Image: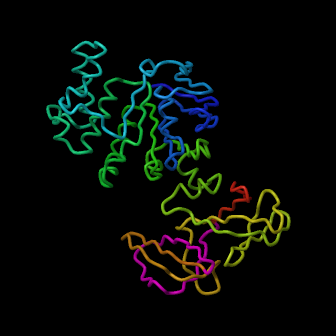
Amino acid sequence: MAGLELRKVYKRFAAIEVIHGVDLEVEPGEFVVFVGPSGCGKSTLLRMIAGLEPISDGQLLIGGQDVTDVPAVKRGLAMVFQSYALYPHMSVRKNLSFGLETIGAPKAEIVQKVAEAAEILQITPLLDRKPGQLSGGQRQRVAIGRAIVREPRIFLFDEPLSNLDAELRMQMRVEINKLHRRLGATMIFVTHDQVEAMTLADRIVVLRAGVVEQVGTPLDLYNHPANTFVAGFIGSPRMNLLAASVTAQSGEDVQVTIEGGKSVSLRLADPVPVGTRVTLGVRPEALVPVEEGHGLMRGEVQITEQMGGESFVYVGLPNGRTVTLEIAGQPRITPGELMEVGVEGGRIHLFGPDEQVLRQV
């Protein structure tokens, strides 16, 4: 088990810079998830850590040692890919043991490590099967087992659940979480799925266009997003982001008027001039139907998604924008009806013209 540190790491392909000076520390035993949209650089960053892509500038330290120019095979890492990359002609047992055999590990040690990995992943009854006889989830367990037998300093996962259906993804999230707790190993996991990030991570690294937008625990990012990108990316359904402007300001108190809606009063740590264009953010669960005249906005219900335990209601506003409400239970709401929408609690986020959060007091 080892920690990892990236110091001002850059990646360039010819004249194109795709990773822009990333600084990051991963503590020993920590589960860190890289998340972001396709093309944000998360897999490239993981491959640089693995040694599969050279670092253009900066330093990579593992366990306090500079391994920037150390070949992948000597870094002591194990990687699990999106594709299972199993040898189809070999049994599960042989797939697990093959890497140890190629480095000349003693036979007794190989047998022991294969048995231990199979027990951890509950694939002991599958050891004599071929990959073609396994389900997708079982094959992914074998791929993870192949990493476990190597006893790596750090586990690297590159979107390992993307090829699984929704139910199997949920099961494998649970299995990977249990595996992390059992091994206490350092793990770095790449995904574009923010649900995977929220449920697996000790800390999440949100990337956009090769830049780290924010690092924090899942609930830190959910409750205190640093900018509109993180606010809109973390959370499902996403945060409602509404165009607004500052219409009055007195000391710490400002009045913010929603485009096509009403005004709300907030207290900000720093003054914001009247006329400033801002973005008001509210989570779907913080929006509620209210009596006429008591809300911040009014619109027409477009559609209701009944999920059983909760319902998602989409309300179209006069300015053409749509807000999403998450309502507990199974409310009877008909498309086409008018709805007044208010905020429950004071859970309102405000972002400035630069998309960065404005601190409230």
Residue ranking furthest to the front: 14
Q: Quadrant of the N terminus?
A: top left
Check the picture and name the quadrant holding the C terminus: bottom right
Residue 58 rendering spot, x and y as whole percentages: 62, 26
Residue 11 seen in render: no
User: For this view, does 231 lie left or right of residue 112?
Assistant: right
Is 257 placed above or below 65 here? below
Magenta span: 318-346
**Residue 166, located in which quarter of the rendered image?**
bottom left
Left or right? Give the position of 160 relative to 321: left
Q: How is the image coloured?
A: rainbow
Note whether 221 is above or below 157 in the view shown.
below
Residue toward you, 9 or 118: 9
Question: Is 213 above or below relative to 320?
Answer: above
**Which residue shows up at 40% across the image and 24% down it?**
152
Residue 162, compared with residue 103, is above or below; it is: below
Residue 111 drawn at (x, y percent): 21, 20
Asked if residue 211 lies in the magenta stretch, the reply is: no
Q: What residue appears at the point 56 percent right and 23 percent down from the top-left corner?
A: 61
Q: Is residue 349 visible?
A: yes
Residue 336 on the magenta span: yes
Residue 356 appears in which quarter of the rendering? bottom right
